[in-house]
Image (cartoon, helix red, strand yellow):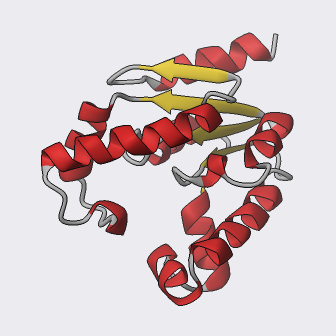
Amino acid sequence: MKVFLIGYMGCGKSTMGRKLSERLDVAFIDLDKYIEQKYFKTIPQIFEEEGEAEFRLKEQAALKEVAEFDDVIVATGGGAPCFFDNMEVMNQAGLCVFLDVDAEELAYRLIHSKTERPLIKGKSPEELVDFILEMMKKRRPFYEKARCVLKGKEIAPEQVVAEIEKRSE
């Protein structure tokens, strides 16, 4: 079993991934953390030192690596589905689940997050909502290639488990 969780930053991919991992007794991989451990640099360092294009190549290689693993839940970075053939890789390897959370809720979560996110630093709540809406316009066509789309403010692990079970019957 392989499940790939995709969606905009703040939608709950990592939190959901950890919960699913425990519930289903399979490994959990946060793709950004996997990249950081592999290259001994943080994602912001890679962006700053090597640029986005190089980061996206590293991300694609890492995604293809973890797509070969068995019994794993993978939380991707928000942009991962939007580059190269990453959506096809995930859809072919396992179940790709888009956690579709509305912009206002994402902005609220990101403002109250402990994680520093350079992309949104210094934005007011209103600017952040507008920024998210603009980014989602570009990303949604990629995200919607997922075989499973779950919409809502609070998406429960049980919803993902039900989708996994439905597809393994």
Q: Position of residue 20 (x, y in %)?
A: 55, 35
Q: Position of residue 159 (x, y in %)?
A: 52, 17
Number of marks drawn: 0
Q: Residue furthest bottom?
A: 49
- Answer with left or right where residue 139 lies relative to residue 53: left
Residue at (34%, 28%) from the top-left corner? 102
Using the image as rendered, state which of residue 88 and residue 126 is in the foreground.
126
Using the image as rendered, state which of residue 38 and residue 80 is in the foreground.
80
Q: Position of residue 164 (x, y in %)?
A: 69, 21
- Answer with left or right where residue 42 lies relative to residue 68: left
- Image quarter where the C terminus lies is top right
Residue 64 shows up from this direction: yes
Residue 22 shows up from this direction: no
- Answer with left or right where residue 11 lies relative to residue 52: left
Q: Position of residue 31 (x, y in %)?
A: 61, 59
Q: Is residue 55 above or below residue 25?
A: below
Residue at (79%, 35%) from the top-left corner? 91
Residue at (68%, 65%) from the top-left corner? 59
- Answer with left or right where residue 140 lies relative to residue 164: left
